[in-house]
Image (spheres, rainbow, N blue to C red):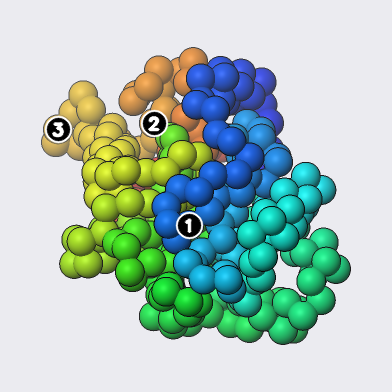
Amino acid sequence: MSPSKVWEQSGWQEYLSARNSGLPYLPAITEVSTEVVRILGGNPGNMQLQGTNTYLVGSGQTRILIDTGQGCPIWLTTLVKYLDQHQLSISQVLLTHWHPDHTGGLPALLAQYPHLAAAVHKADPDRGQHSIRDGQTFTAQGTTLRALFTPGHSQDHMCFVLEESGAMFTGDNVLGHGSSVVVEELGRYMESLQAMTRSVRNEDITVGYPGHGAVIEDLSAKLGLWSRHWELREKKILSAFMKGNAKKKASLTTREIIACIYGPEMETMAGPFIAQVLSKLNDEGKVGLAVVGQEQKWFMF
């Protein structure tokens, strides 16, 4: 079953709905700092939290826009109204990654402001867009944004460091509440968390502006939390192969691994995460997959 279908199952829908019911209210538009204005995409949902965060960045009359939401009309209406009220314009559009809830508003934006068609940047650009390379800088009055390539959640994921104020736009790698549940490639994602952590420590970055959810006030702590979260899952899976017999490593199905760690009733909820970790461990040569009888079983090397 594909990851997108997993989250549509009733158990996950009920969990996500309950989680979202406890999320704090976020206004449609908020000046979160002197350089950053957050505009919600108008698309709250089980996977989007309060909606996709888009950001106007800069302190002058010309701003940089990060992400364009999902394409809900209310987003463009809110954006245009704010720009008009403050006599602002957009010089560049930076897209953190290709997912539709971050790029879906682009066609309407370009219809409203045709000149921006030549100013759209994405790591893996579509036709007519410009690429973004790791370390590339983008400037507006009083503002410098530096790209940090952080694949894993998606193959083209970019974060952006706001150099003047010690902040990072984290995209979907780190959210304001909970974690990013959809990871295309876990190994690269965990490497990206480490790269973000190094940047945070080396550059004294404290604040994170996520793709969904509230401002992250202690980004270093959040990064540490989710790095340890995935590392612990790895340790639990590897220990499952040794359970009950320290001298002989067991061969286990995915279902048996889940039952060993969480109990059989958690197969639907834990399955996607366990599959992601097993795939990573397989890529690293720590576990393998073989057909035993009529079942596919994992084993430790």
Which residue: 56% across, 57% down? 55
Residue 170 visible within the image: no
| For discs 3 and 1, the disc positioned in front in the rendered view | 1
Q: Earlier in the sequence, mark 3 or mark 1?
A: 1
* Secondary structure of the residue carrying numbered label 1: strand
Q: Residues within 10 Å of mark 2 (few under 14, many from 20)?
A: many
Badge 3 amino acid: Ala
Badge 2 amino acid: Ile
Residue topped by disc 2 = 257
Q: Earlier in the sequence, mark 2 or mark 3?
A: 3
Mark 2–mark 1 distance (CA, rounded to whole Å): 45 Å
Q: Residues within 10 Å of mark 3 (few under 14, many from 20)?
A: few
* Secondary structure of the residue carrying numbered label 2: helix
Residue topped by disc 3 = 246
Report the number of numbered marks.
3
Q: Which of the numbered marks, if any, corresponds to residue 36?
A: 1
State whether residue 107 is above or below residue 228.
below
